[in-house]
C-alpha cells in the first residue's frame, strides 16, 4: 500500500535532552505539541551509518565497516505566516542551543484507526526566509539537525 505526503502534519514540542540510548515513544508522552502550518515540503529524515574504511594492501581491496549513525537534517519549507504559533516556535528555537521534540503525523490512518507517526529530537539549525520572484509565495525554510533515532509509530486499525 502507498500513501501520499499530502495531509501530513509537523509539530514542535519542548526542549528534550540528548541521551546515550535510543528514544522510545514514551519519551514523548508528556509533550505539548504545536503544529507548524503552511508546509510545502517535509524533506527527509532517517539514519545513515558513517563509513569507516581501510585499504588492505595484501588484498588489493578496501574493507568497510559501519561507524556512528546520523539521522541527517530535515529540511522543511513552509509558506510564511507571521501569526502561526508553530513558525514562531521554530524561530524561537533557532535562537537557543537546545534540542526540541518534533513529531510528524501522516495522513494514513485506516478507517476508524490512528495514523503513523515519527518522533525525534533536533536542534533548529537555521530558519531563513526565501522571497524568490514576483509570482512566488514567500517561504520559511528551516533545517532540523536530528540528534536522535527516529521513533516510528505505525498506523493502527480501530477497535
Image (cartoon, grey):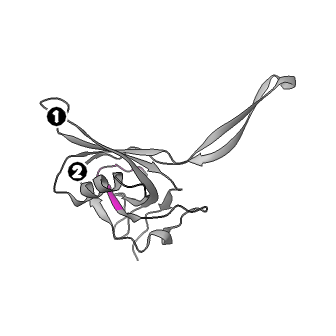
Pointer 1: what residue?
136
In this view, 8 is above or below 48 = below
Residue 38, disc: 2
Q: Is residue 89 visible?
A: yes
Q: Which quarter of the picture shows residue 52? A: top right
Quadrant showing the C terminus: bottom left
| Most common secondary structure along the magenta stretch | loop
Callout 1: SS: loop
| Residue 81 magenta | no
Residue located farthest toward the left when viewing the structure as drawn: 134
**Tag 2–tag 1 contact (CB < 8 Å):** no
Question: Which residue occupies 52% across, 56% down?
Answer: 148
| Residue 8 magenta | yes
- From the top left corner, tell me how far across and down residue 113 is, in percent: 37, 69
Q: CA distance from mark 2 to mark 1?
A: 14 Å
Q: Is residue 7 visible?
A: no
In this view, 82 is above or below 27 = above
- From the top left corner, tell me how far across and down residue 71 is, in percent: 52, 48
- From the top left corner, tell me how far across and down residue 144 is, in percent: 40, 49
Classed neighbour count for the residue bearing mark 2: other residues with Cα under 10 Å, few (<14), some (14–19), many (≥20): some
Q: Which quarter of the picture shows residue 90? A: bottom left
Q: Which quarter of the picture shows residue 23? A: bottom right
Question: Which residue occupies 67% across, 44% down?
Answer: 67
Question: Which residue occupies 58% across, 62% down?
Answer: 22
Which region shows up in magenta?
2-12
Q: Earlier in the sequence, mark 2 or mark 1?
A: 2
The one of 139 and 91 positioned closer to us in this rendering: 91
The one of 116 and 149 positioned closer to us in this rendering: 149
Question: Which residue occupies 84% across, 23% down?
Answer: 57
In this view, 77 is above or below 135 = below
Residue 63, disc: none
Classed neighbour count for the residue bearing mark 1: other residues with Cα under 10 Å, few (<14), some (14–19), many (≥20): few
Amino acid at each position: 500500500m502507498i500513501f501520499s505526503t499530502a495531509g501530513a502534519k509537523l509539530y514542535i514540542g519542548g526542549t528534550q535532552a540528548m541521551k546515550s540510548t535510543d528514544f522510545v515513544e514514551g519519551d514523548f508522552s508528556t509533550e505539548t505539541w504545536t503544529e507548524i502550518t503552511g508546509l510545502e515540503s517535509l524533506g527527509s529524515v532517517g539514519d545513515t551509518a558513517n563509513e569507516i574504511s581501510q585499504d588492505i594492501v595484501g588484498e588489493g581491496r578496501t574493507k568497510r565497516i559501519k561507524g556512528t549513525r546520523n539521522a541527517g537534517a530535515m529540511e522543511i519549507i513552509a509558506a510564511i505566516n507571521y501569526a502561526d504559533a508553530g513558525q514562531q516556535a521554530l524561530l524561537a528555537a533557532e535562537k537557543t542551543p537546545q534540542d526540541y521534540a518534533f513529531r510528524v503525523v501522516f495522513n494514513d490512518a485506516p478507517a476508524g484507526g490512528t495514523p503513523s507517526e515519527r518522533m525525534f529530537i533536533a536542534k533548529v539549525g537555521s530558519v531563513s526566509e526565501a522571497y524568490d520572484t514576483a509570482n512566488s509565495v514567500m517561504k520559511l525554510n528551516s533545517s532540523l539537525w536530528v540528534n536522535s533515532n527516529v521513533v516510528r509509530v505505525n498506523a493502527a486499525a480501530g477497535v
